[in-house]
Image (cartoon, rainbow, N blue to C red):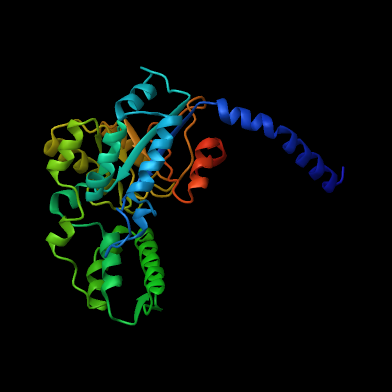
Amino acid sequence: MEPSIRKRIRDGLAWRMRPVTRYVSRYRPVFIVQNYHRLFRDTLTTDFDEGVFGGISEEYFRRQLAHLARDYDVLSEGEVIDCLGGKGRFPRKALLLTFDDGYKDNYTLAYPVLQGLRLPALFFIPTLPWSTRQLGWWDLIAWCVKKTDRPTVTIDGEARPLGTTAEKAAAITRLLQKFYRLPDAETRDLLETLSRDLDVALPDTDVQSRELMTTAEIREMLDHGMAVGAHTHSHKVLSTLDRQAQDREIGTSKQLLEEGLGVAVRSFAYPVGTAHSFDDGTKKLVRDHGFSLAFSFYSGVNDPAGGIDPYDIRRTFRGHPYAGFLESFREPYTFIHPRQ
């Protein structure tokens, strides 16, 4: 049979199967984890990394959650643990809300919305920023580039222009990509070198601390139905570390959170969370430290009927436009992606 004929037959079958595919998508159980980092109140203005906001304002967040709460059963961390441990069953349309990195607006903006809608959420806290009141490397890279008056920055031997806001944004993206892929030993002096080359002092502790939740704020959220998970100690990409260093990052974060907050920490989120940022050895370390759940962040949804790896639970982020956000949750299995 000619290839063109086979293609026409295949395309015709696919078209005829569309109603069946949509039926399966609509009635097949699904577990989605929607992840956030930061929110802004009305207009996004920051001296730090804009990428972690994802374009999500407080009001847009409220609209999202109101819609999701109508269509999905929003689960707590404990309910997810029970479902994966055989002590319960996932609802047909299950959802978990998570937040990464412990930013202040998680408390000032997201938490009141969650309370108003009576929804639980899980907040992942990297313990070095929390305990030392110092922001993550991604925010400090953005600070240096945004604050500099230098016309260029050299990245991998190439002079990148910094004359416009767009050029600075492109340079920040390139620097973050470089940081992600380098072995840990090669990144230790990156911030100091960048600060010196761009002639920008890193922000003082008070400036950095204002961007982060305090222990008292986290405890208040815990007292009102929220949960806290570990996100390593220093937010290093675990695949750039040897096993011993990975073990320290994972174990230290759990220990410090449990000692500082007085709660059992049962969930872990891999920093960055792409398929290449952790491996089976990393998952074993997480399991050996007594975590019940671990979350990645390379998109896709989780299929309760097909089986869910409790140490590689998919998370996704659906933001703008609102129509696209609605469609992605209406037909969730359109957004399954293989681990690559």
Which residue sits at x=43%, y=39%?
Answer: 314
Quadrant hosting residue 185: bottom left
Which residue sits at x=43%, y=49%?
Answer: 276
> Depth check: 298 or 220 in front?
220
Instruction: Say above or below: 251 vs 76.
Output: below
Q: If the image is split into quadrants, where does the N terminus sit? A: top right
Instruction: Say above or below: 249 vs 144.
Output: above
Residue 95 place in picture, x, y as percent: 41, 32
Direction top: furthest residue:
87
Residue 90 place in picture, x, y as percent: 43, 23
Residue 215 place in picture, x, y as percent: 13, 43
Exactly how many numbered labels are in the figure? Answer: 0
In the drawing, does residue 243 fall left or right of residue 219? right
Residue 295 can be seen in this image: yes
Instruction: Say above or below: 163 vs 121.
Output: below
Residue 159 place in picture, x, y as percent: 39, 80
> Depth check: 188 or 140 in front?
140
Residue 340 can be seen in this image: no
Which residue sits at x=29%, y=58%?
Answer: 184
Quadrant hosting residue 133: bottom left
